[in-house]
Amino acid sequence: METNLIGALNGSYVAMQQFVEHGEGTLINVASVAGKVAMPYFAIYGGTKSAILSMSASIRRELELNGQENIHVCVVNPWATDTSFFEHGSNYTGHSLRMPMIDDPEIVVDAIVGLIDDPKDEVDVGVKSKDTTLGSHLAPGLTEAASAKLIHHTLMEKAPPARVTSGSVNEPVAAGTEVEGYTRERVAEEDRCKDS
């Protein structure tokens, strides 16, 4: 909550003060497809990302009402991305943290950089985010049920046992200081060991 929501609130507040003073700017907040489509075992995470979507939309409308047309508020909605997220996250599942079909961090970086020159209200990053969002509009119950089964299978049935950890919630974690999280490699190795 402090990192995902309060951090985004504080960052948005400071950025907007600067943008209003200068009459222009682009605020880019990072939410998630999990803020748009319910996913099991990510209730708090998804809730904070939904809040970022709502907060950003509210700020955007306030700017419009006050004639601040040169200030943009953008939101990026990635799928699970191969960053150090999984090393820093708390884990009380008893299983190795993973998500199906993890994306490259570069596509998220490219989406964020692209919004600097071409601001948009929201960008769903990658095919999986776009397809999941579209599915949630066309068939919300079916999309949530399919996503839930896939995530449950990947996280709770397929993943090997792992120790419980609070991650970096209470204190910094030494690992995971790079952009790339190498989660895909770790998951592939875990699956090889499990199968052998």
Image: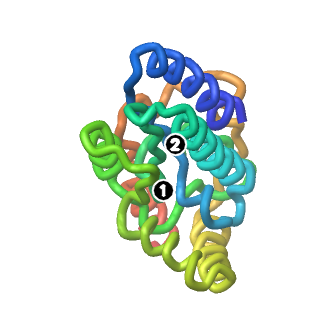
In the picture provided, is 144 more to the left or to the right than 68?
Answer: right
Kind of residue indicated by mark 1: Ala
Relative to 45, say whether 113 is above or below.
Answer: above
Secondary element type, mark 1: loop
Kind of residue indicated by mark 2: Phe
- The residue labelled by disc 1 is 80
In the picture provided, is 76 more to the left or to the right than 47?
Answer: left
Marker disc for residue 85: 2
Q: Quadrant of residue 171?
A: top right
- What's the residue at 58%, 65% (across, down)? 159
Secondary element type, mark 2: helix
- Assign the C terminus to one quadrant of the image: bottom left
Q: Position of residue 54 (x, y in %)?
A: 65, 48
Residue nearer the viewer, 50 or 187: 50
Residue nearer the viewer, 85 or 10: 10
Q: Quadrant of residue 114?
A: top left
Q: Position of residue 116 (x, y in %)?
A: 30, 37
Q: Residues under labels 2 and 1: Cα distance? A: 9 Å
Relative to 147, say whether 124 is above or below.
Answer: above
Question: How crowded is the residue under tag 2: few (<14 C-alpha within 10 Å), some, or many (20+)?
Answer: some
In the picture provided, is 189 more to the left or to the right than 34?
Answer: left
- Assign the N terminus to one quadrant of the image: top right
Is the C-beta separation of discs 2 and 1 under 8 Å? Answer: yes
Q: How is the image coloured?
A: rainbow
In the picture provided, is 61 more to the left or to the right than 90?
Answer: left
Q: Position of residue 195 (x, y in %)?
A: 48, 74
Residue nearer the viewer, 76 or 186: 76
Q: Is residue 168 visible?
A: no
- What's the residue at 48%, 46% (across, down)? 75
Question: How crowded is the residue under tag 1: few (<14 C-alpha within 10 Å), some, or many (20+)?
Answer: many
Mark 2 or mark 1: name the one nearer the start of the chain.
Answer: 1
Q: Is residue 88 visible?
A: yes
